[in-house]
Amino acid sequence: MAIKDGMIMEYKYEMANTRKMLERVPFEQSTFKPHEKSRAMANEAMHIANVLSWIPRIANTPEFDVAKPGAMPKIELPKNNQELLEMFDKNYAEGLSALENASDESMMTPWTFRNGEHVVFTLPRVAAIRNMGLNHHYHHRGQMSVYLRMANVPVPGMYGPSADEA
């Protein structure tokens, strides 16, 4: 089995779960924050949809430098669920395509994340995709479940029914 094959199966399964979560984001409560240090709900949802854009970035470039002008373009906040899901679906498809087109050799090639001269890390692409694309995504999806719970929105089950679906 190629390195990408297990990752693709996981990606498809987990992103179906993420889509269920994002479908429930209540944009009438888009400014809700569970804590003063938290992002607003719409910003957190947008971040979840956009973290997937790191997958093709990692798969198709040797490094990423956040200090370069234009490296982190400003993304317009979605106004509703339709715009959020379109953003998610676009990034999902591009991430899936990047994984499908990856060879074992390319997945083992070092990838560097830097801030100017400061190297944050250099890892094989497979590990960078796991950390920056997937684990980071799952972390924020878990946070979104708290946002939904606190906003009194039924939380979808991820690995079986949630308390709202039991």
Image (spheres, rainbow, N blue to C red):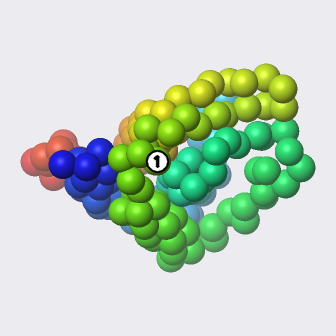
Label 1: state its secondary structure: helix
148 and 8: which is toward the camera: 8
Rate crowding at label 1 as few (under 14), some (14 to 19) or many (20 or more) other CA atoms within 10 Å: some
Q: Which residue is disc 1 drawn over?
A: 106
Q: How many marks?
A: 1
Residue 150 coordinates in the image, percent (x, y): 43, 40
Residue 37, relative to residue 146: is it above or below?
A: above
Residue drawn at 72 percent across, 61 percent down:
75
109 and 91: which is toward the camera: 109
Residue 80, relative to residue 30: is it above or below?
A: below
Q: Is residue 83 left or right of residue 142?
A: right
Quadrant in the picture for residue 105: top left
13 and 161: which is toward the camera: 13
Quadrant in the picture for residue 143: top left
Residue 85 coordinates in the image, percent (x, y): 47, 70
Amino acid at pointer 1: Ser
As drawn, the residue found furthest toward the left would be 166
Residue drawn at 63 percent across, 51 percent down:
61
- Visible in this render: residue 118? yes
Residue 135 coordinates in the image, percent (x, y): 42, 36
Residue drawn at 67 percent across, 42 percent down:
63
Q: Is residue 57 left or right of residue 26?
A: right
As drawn, the residue found furthest toward the right would be 69
Residue 37 coordinates in the image, percent (x, y): 66, 29
